[in-house]
Amino acid sequence: MTRSLRLASASVFIRVLVGLVVVALPAHSGESLAPALRVRVDTSVQAVLARTGVPSASIALVRNHAIVYANAYGWAQLEPRRVATPPMRYAIGSITKEFTAAAVLLLQEGGRLSVDDPAGKWITGLGAAADVSIRSLLSHTSGIRDYWPQDYDPPAMLKPVTIEEIVSGWANQPLDFATGSAWQYSNTGYVVAGMIAEKAAREPLFLFMRAHIFGPLHMVSVVDFDAAPLPAGDASGYTRYALGPPRPAVKEGRGWLFAAAQLAMNASDLARWDIALIERRLLSSASLRDLTTEVRLANGVGTGYGLGLDVQLDSGRRVLKHGGEVGGFTAENRIYPDDGIAIVVLTNEDATDAHDTIADELAELMLVADSPADAAAVADAKHMFSELQRGRIDPAHLTANARSYFSAVALADFKSSLGPLGDPVEFTLKRSARRGGLITRVYDISFSNRKLSAVVRAMPDGRIEQYTVSAK
């Protein structure tokens, strides 16, 4: 599931723990992260666990189409304590939807169905939902009512259910909106799509995925978390009430996670799937286009979602991503296909945004901080900020437009407003992009009692066209 999230505080023993437990997995290719970057990655993940109190995290990083780093941090189990290690499996929740959508597309490639088939062609008793297409089910534009909008497990979800009962309870209700007129997340839609896939494949969905996705990609750790809890050697799931201590989570009853959130695996196996998408393997070009192309509503508005994937631009970079949550676990999967980069973060606590925060920070490191050009730009921008705090700037580093901007009045204001702040505690490049022939870099500048943002636009030869500072 992907649900709204709440913050959690850290207990003292976990604050100590995350600084001690780090287990590395060798890279899966000849390339690996530079030692300095590995330290920054480890430090970043440990800091998030310390702030939030989440027991553990497992990550895998992809660069140049290969896994270059995998690591695990913290406790896979609190009582008795077990150290988290990279081979351990975590439930990935709604990231499962990527695989369900891919399975449907593979069935389409085999001529067994069409994503434009109406659901009623395959499933009876759908009522108003009989006319919705499989494509609309996979893109959350069907209007079928979601059976799990809550941020916790209602009592009924702790008991087993059949997928037919889910369909009769939710999918045959009146549509929440006319198909294609709105976007609304619906786990029910994926249950229906999974049922259709099973009928077309003539075998259970998990077995089809194992034969046609997990096997070919050597994803050997994948298990059906809907069918049974994780084995004892894997991560244990935890939940938290407000800011209380982490408590063992109760797994949902069998049937509730089918097709929408049923998979569990280790971080490296999820990264292998990401590499296949980056390399355009497994799926045909047409299927990959369906999977990764933003679906538009009938009125032309984009949804930011393809089939089982969020499809977005982040600082000018295309990113395919999805989050996941089930009882005791949260996860984040991000793929930057044009950059050959992917980031996988798995954690063993639900209702937390730690996975998202870790992914944000790792994205900054993978996409920005390790670039030699960006590293040099950070040093130059930090030095220029220090100079502006003193009311001066070297005009040789500026374009004619920037020299005009930095008038005597402007320099005086920079000095009087920034000088008293002293040296920054942090000066961090947040993102970079190109626009109008300029390289744009945005920095976060932190002091003990306030934060600033700086936008620096430079010519290809390095001369500064803009250096503006504002409060955050």
Image: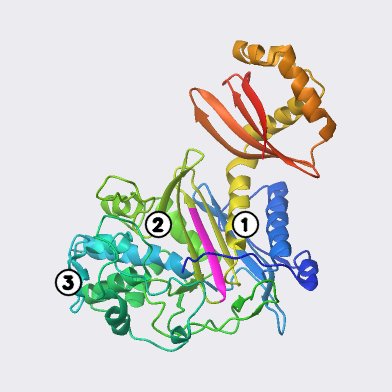
Of callouts 2 and 1, the N-terminal one: 2
Which part of the image, by quadrant, shows the C terminus?
Answer: top right
Residue with the mark numbered 3 = 120
Q: Quadrant of residue 79?
A: bottom right
Which residue is nearer to you in this view: 434 or 296? 296
What residue range appears in magenta? 328-334
Image coordinates of residue 25 in percent, x first then y, are 64, 63
Counting other residues with Cα less than 10 Å from the Cα at mark 3, is it few (<14), some (14-19), or many (20 or more)?
Answer: some
Residue at (40% x, 68% y) in the render? 214
Q: Is residue 216 at all visible to an observer of this figure? A: no
The answer to whether any part of residue 368 appears in the image is yes
| Residue neighbourhood size for the residue with mark 2, other residues' Cα within 10 Å, grouped as few (<14), some (14–19), many (≥20) | many
Q: Are marks 2 and 1 in contact (CB under 8 Å)?
A: no
Q: Secondary structure at mark 3?
A: helix
Query: How far across and how far down the image is residue 130, in percent?
Result: 18, 70
Secondary structure of residue under mark 1: helix
Q: Residue at x 66, y 69 (%)?
A: 56
Q: Which mark is residue 373?
A: none
Residue 109 percent location from the top left of the image: 23, 60
Q: Dot 1 corresponds to which residue?
A: 358
Disc 2 on helix, strand or loop? loop
Which residue in the rendered view is the most extreme toward the left?
Answer: 121
Amino acid type, callout 2: Leu
Residue type at tag 3: Gly
- State whether the magenta stretch is mostly helix, strand or loop: strand
- Can you identify the residue that label 2 sits on? 309
Residue 48 located left or right of residue 104:
right
Among the two numbered marks 3 and 2 on one chain, the one whose residue lies closer to the N terminus? 3
